[in-house]
Amino acid sequence: MSASPTPPEPLADPQPVRPRGPLDVRVRPPGSRSLTNRALAVAALATGPSELVGATESEDAAAMREGLRALGVPVAVEGATWRVRGGGGRLAATGPIALDVRASGTTARFLTALASLTAPGADVTIDGTARMRERPIRELVDALSALGVDAKALGPGGCPPVRVRGGGLSGGRIQVDARRSSQYVSALLLAAPCATADLTIALADGRLVSRPFVDLTLQVMTAFGATAGWTEAGELAVRADAPYRGRRYPIEPDAQAAVYAFAAAAIAGGRVVVEGIPPDSQQPDLHVLEALEAMGCRVRREADRIELRATRGALDGIRWNGNHAPDAVLALAVVALFARGPTEIHDIANLRIKETDRLAALENEIRRLGGRAEAGPDSLRIEPAPLRGAAIETYADHRIAMSFALAGLVVPGVSIRDPGCVAKTWPDFFAALAAW
């Protein structure tokens, strides 16, 4: 059994979840947090203004937006449209600056790389919550140092705070250890078109966790005019003579949020239609649909919408590689409690370095509901068992809260402690769930 993460003190009364029958709902999730933060970074470095349409108002996106403002990037918010005035490959900040990324790992990694593009002599410190100070960033700092950046992880074990001095980014060929997080690679890619020379990134041992998130980064970069992509040798190459250009960029609805709607229908039965996500979307969390289909759900993709239908009580257990969509693993693990056989999810070691040790938290909370779960170093096995109501600990982790709330659609007496933690990515989640 995994060591138990320590839950923080609850900030509000537990949020009860009302059981209900089969669903028949249409959902349009908020804008993609992953796309919003990538587009913010790129627009900040572009030549000319950009307009991000459909951006999400979440704590993660707010941390990224405020961090860029502190680095000298004007960002104007008009509802879901955010206007960014790019710096043409440089950030205007000159003095000592302290950035609070809160609990946003994406923001911490992206701003660490972007801080190298501040003015010579600028001194930027990136810091966040107590948990952020436990999340590793040494691999990114080492890569930046290899590119001539004065950067140092100040925390124990190569964790934040991080100090970065501005002055620019050289190019060349470097090797990056991306076995723990793809965000190290995405951060370097986002800054690379502004380097002094072309950049080639080789992967240590040829391994990259959660590759689809790197592909998503490349998609956003090329949409703004960069020349970047995979080579035949399995490396990543970015040209420095193809800068970003400002543009109008629509943000797709968030597939990470859509996961909870799909999982809700799988658990409670019925039908859910998620609107606004195009059939060719590259958002990695859509891989969860493959797992839900294997469990017995029916999925139909159409232009600008995805429909999932399920029969309550008719799910089968599966074996699934969660590496491509690790954030979706939490909701899938809760779905597995309602299957007719065991489910094994593997290749998910990086869940231990997220907002909490998610494998340990899943094991603990599944058992709290009466289910059987066993977490390994990089895997989770779930066996269905008679379930009971419980007050779920969330460990200040939004995905634990949203995932286990889905069990309450069928199991009476489920409530979620510290429900406000969902503001990190979907502030209105519980209101949306109540309307389904």
Image (tube, rainbow, N blue to C red):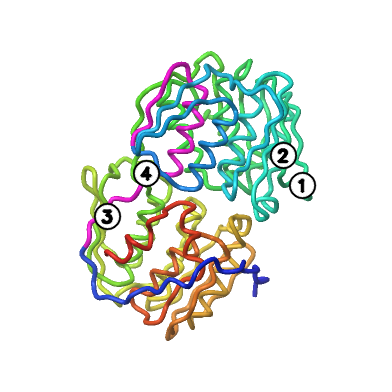
Gap between marks 1 and 3 measured at Cα: 42 Å
Gap between marks 4 and 3 measured at Cα: 12 Å
Instruction: Give the class, few, some or many, for how many residues have Cα within 10 Å of label 4's Cα (few <14, many ≥20).
Output: many
Percent position of residue 252, x then y: 34, 41
- Which residue is the site of mark 3? 27
Tag 3: residue type? Val
- Which residue is the site of mark 2? 162
Quadrant location of residue 281?
A: top left
SS for tag 1? strand
- Which residue is the site of mark 4? 31
Tag 2: residue type? Val
The answer to which of marks 3 and 2 sits earlier in the sequence is 3
The answer to which of marks 1 and 3 sits earlier in the sequence is 3
Magenta region, residue range: 25-53
Q: Are marks 2 and 4 in contact (CB under 8 Å)?
A: no
The answer to which of marks 4 and 1 sits earlier in the sequence is 4
SS for tag 4? loop
Q: Is residue 32 magenta?
A: yes
Is the N terminus in the top left, top right, bottom left or bottom right quadrant?
Answer: bottom right
Tag 4: residue type? Gly
- Which residue is the site of mark 1? 155
Percent position of residue 79, x then y: 35, 38
The answer to which of marks 1 and 2 sits earlier in the sequence is 1
Q: Residue at x 77, y 50 (%)?
A: 157
Q: Are marks 1 and 2 in contact (CB under 8 Å)?
A: yes
Q: Nearer the viewer, residue 274 or 340?
A: 274
SS for tag 3? strand
